Amino acid sequence: MTTAIIYATTHGTTEKVALRMQHLLGDQNSLMINLKNIKNVDLKQYDKIIIGGSIHAGMLQKSVKGFINKNKDELLQKPLGLFICGMNVPEYQAQIERAFPESLRKHAKSVKVAGGEFLFDKMNLFQKIIVRKISGIKESVSKIDDKKIEEFIKEFND
Ligand SMILES: Cc1cc2nc3c(=O)[nH]c(=O)nc-3n(C[C@H](O)[C@H](O)[C@H](O)COP(=O)(O)O)c2cc1C
């Protein structure tokens, strides 16, 4: 059984989470697909699909949204897992609901927020100002939720 982990990442955190998932799945059974590099994914090649992205200003990346819209019918035919990375804990549920269509959330074996990071060395000036103003956080911080990642893979494998 081959799993495709299809994702977009702005500062690398979603990619880190995807790698941890790949490790838990078993490296030989899964393949990472960064939507920045590969635009046309042939889903027929994969038995199971994981889709992930991160939230910026309340929204999931456009590349992930576009991929989902284009492939929705096929995604409904396969075992599916959906995750986002984000730092605004009170908004997690609303952001998940905005990120993925209800039909896919209901179909998915697991839907989770895997935590996130603020990486100031990777932000441009505008991003630094926004993050400082909205979150009050001024230094890089990692809140990747390994427990949620483990739960996600457990549910996905069930
Ligand atoms: C400019 C900016 C805006 C952000 N807006 C949100 C937000 O609205 N909600 C949220 O939960 N996290 C927000 N975050 C946190 C990101 O989701 C977090 O940094 C995530 O780990 C990024 O993952 P990535 O590097 O894979 O893109 C924001 C981060 C930045 C830099």
Image (cartoon, rainbow, N blue to C red):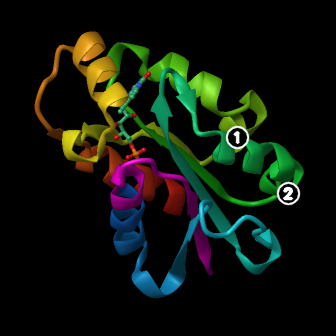
- 157 horizontally vs 43: left or right: left
Residue at the extreme right:
73
Q: Check residue 119 for magenta coloring.
A: no
N-terminal label among 1 and 2 = 1
Frontmost residue, 61 versus 133: 133
Image coords of residue 22 (percent x, y): 42, 71
Crowd class of label 2 (few under 14; some 14 to 19; many from 20; radius 10 Å): few
Residue 26 visible in this rendered orientation of the protein: yes
Q: Looking at the picture, which amino acid does disc 1 mark?
A: Lys
Residue drawn at x 78%, y 54% is 75
Q: Classify mark 1 as within 8 Å of ligand 1 or not, answering yes or no.
A: no
Image coords of residue 146 (percent x, y): 25, 50
- 151 horizontally vs 34: left or right: left
Q: Looking at the picture, which amino acid does disc 2 mark?
A: Glu
Image coords of residue 30 (percent x, y): 52, 77
Residue drawn at x 43%, y 58% is 153
Residue 158 visible in this rendered orientation of the protein: no
User: Is residue 120 placed above or below 96 in the rendered structure?
Assistant: below
Crowd class of label 1 (few under 14; some 14 to 19; many from 20; radius 10 Å): some
User: Is residue 7 placed above or below 96 in the rendered structure?
Assistant: below
Which label lies toward us, 1 or 2?
1
In what quadrant does ligand 1 lie?
top left
Q: CA distance from mark 1 to mark 2?
A: 15 Å
Residue at the extreme front:
125
> On the rendered image, what quadrant is the N terminus found in?
bottom right
What residue is shown with label 1? 65
Image coords of residue 4 (percent x, y): 61, 70
Q: Which mark is residue 74?
A: 2
What span is in magenta? 1-16
Residue drawn at x 31%, y 38% is 115
